[in-house]
Amino acid sequence: MKTINFKNYLLALLTSVAIMSCVQDDDFSVPESVGTEENIALTELLSGDINLVSISEVKAMYDSSSEMPFRVDTNIVVKGYVTSSDLTGNFYKEFYLQDSPENPTAAIKIILSQVDSYNRFNKGREVYINLNPLFESGVPGGLYIGEERVGNEVITIGGGTESDQYGTTVTSLTQSQMDATLIRSEITEEIVPLNVQFSQIASVHVGMFVQIDNVEFEDNLAGLRYFDPSEDYDTQRTLQSCSGFSYSNMNLETSGFANYKNEMLPTGNGSVAGVVSKTYDGSSLILALNTTDDVDFSGSRCELLNVDDFGILFEEDFEAYANFDQISGNWTNYIEEGSRDWIARTTTDTGNPGSRIAQISAYNSGDASTVSWLITPQIDLDAQEFEFFDFESSNSFSDGSELELLISTDWDGTDASVSSATWTSLPGTIVPDATYYKDWIYSGLVDLSPYSGNAHIAFKYTANSGNTGTYEIDNVKVLVQN
C-alpha cells in the first residue's frame, strides 16, 4: 500500500474546512454532496498506509476493567453510518455511528465541540474516522477510546482525556481534530431501523437506530407533553408494550432543548423509532428520538390477554428425575462439543429451595470447548392463535460462559441436524452474570405467535476452558389459548 502524501492531504482538508465552515455558520441545510476537496482527502486517506477496522474492533481497544481510555497509536480508520441527528435539539455535541445501514452489529459514540452538526453529519451519512492523524507539526495525534463518564459503559471516541476523583474519561474532539479526523463520503444511506422488542434491548444496542412495534405511552400520561417544564434538563416518559399478560416498558428521554418538547404525547398505539442511549449516569437504557416523525401511534391502544383464557400445553419441573440423572425422555440432550450434558440436580438456593432443576456446567471438565443443547419436544404452533413460553433461570460462576434461548421451525428432531438447523434467538430474560447465585430470574412471557409450524425451543450452553460457569433452569412451560 502506498504512503499518504500528508502535505497534499492536509491542504485538501484545510480547504474543505474553509468551505464547510461557511455552511455551518450561515446555512443549516444538509449538503447534497461533499466537495471535491473532501473527496480527494478521503481518497488520499484510504489509499494510504492505513488499515480499515470495524466498530467492534475499535470498542474492544478499551479495557473497561482498567477504566483507562486507550490512545490509538497505529494508522487505523473506522467507518460507520450516522444514526442520530441534532436537528431537533435532542442530541447535543455528539453523534452515533453504527457499522451498517441495516442489521447493525455494533455502534459507537463520537463527542464533539460543535453544535448543529447535523448539516455535516446528517443521519445516514457514511463517515470515516482517521483514528491516528498526522498534524502539521508532523506528530501523530491519536484519538482516545473510552467512556465519557466513568462507569456508564458507553464506549466513545474522544480527542483527549481528563481525570478527577472518580477516574479518567475522554473529552470532546476539538474543531481541529474534527477537521483532521472526520471525513464524509458522498454516500448517505437510508438507515433501516433494527426491529426489536423492549425485552431484547441491551447495552450492545447503544447508538443503534431501532424500532419497537405495538407500543404506546403509559396510561397515566394522557394529556401530558414530551417535556415536563418542572424538569431542568431531561424528561423521561414511560413507553409500554403489551407482552401477553403484562406490559414491558422502556423510558423515552426528551431534552429540554428539543424543539418538539411542547408537543402533546400521542395517546394511540403503534411504532416508535429512535436511538438507544443511556441516562446521564449510565444506570439505565433509554430511547432518544431524532424527530417525532418517527412516532406513529395512530392505532388503537392494545389490550392485555387474560391468563384465565390460557391453559398449559407443555410443562416441565424436572421433579420426576433423580439427582444427577441425565435429562432425557421427550427432551433432546445433545452434546455438540465437549463431554458435559444437562443433568437433574436438587437445588438449595434460597430463591428455589428443594426443587429439582436442570443444570449444565463445564467446571472441571477438562474440555477446551463445551457446547450443550437441551431442546424441548415438538410444539405445534398452528393448533391455536397464541402461544407463550416461560421459565426460570439461575447461575453460578458465570464467568463468560453463555446460555442462549433459541427457536427452530425446521429442525427434524435428530441429533445429526441440530447444528445445521436454523435457530433464531428468543427475547426471554436469562439470568445476568451479576445476579446473586442463589437467586432465580423469571424469563417473562415469550410470545411465540410470530412463528408457525412445528417448533422446538432450545437452551444452548457455550463455554471454554477459561469460562466454565454453571447455568440452571426450572419450571419450563408453554401456555396456549383455550
Image (tube, helix red, strand yellow):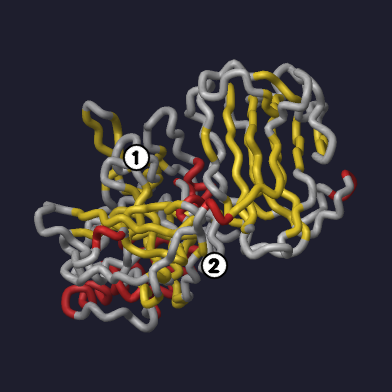
Q: Residue at x 58, y 27 (%)?
A: 395
Residue kind at label 2, given as amino acid type = Glu
Q: Which mark is residue 152?
A: 1
Residue kind at label 1, given as amino acid type = Asn
Nearer-the-camera pick, 385 or 170: 385
Q: Which mark is residue 130?
A: none
Q: Quadrant of residue 357?
A: top right
Q: Quadrant of residue 451?
A: bottom right
Residue ID for mark 2: 102
Q: Residue at x 70, y 52 (%)?
A: 407
Q: Position of residue 435 (x, y in %)?
A: 48, 28
Q: Residue at x 64, y 65 (%)?
A: 385
Asked whether, in this view, residue 345 is left or right of residue 268, the answer is right
Q: Position of residue 204 (x, y in %)?
A: 48, 48
| Callout count | 2
Q: Are marks 1 and 2 in contact (CB under 8 Å)?
A: no
Question: Does the rendering let one see residue 76?
Answer: no
Residue lying farthest bottom?
32
Nearer-the-camera pick, 37 or 131: 131
Above or below, 314 relative to 366: below
Q: Position of residue 373 (x, y in %)?
A: 76, 39
Above or below, 481 relative to 413: below
Q: Residue at x 44, y 76 (%)?
A: 188
State the CA–CA distance, disc 1 to disc 2.
26 Å
Question: Does the rendering let one see residue 293?
Answer: yes
Quadrant location of the N terminus?
bottom right
Quadrant location of the C terminus?
bottom right
Asked whether, in this view, residue 196 is left or right of residue 183, the answer is right
Q: Secondary structure at mark 2?
A: loop
Asked whether, in this view, residue 457 is left or right of residue 279, the answer is right
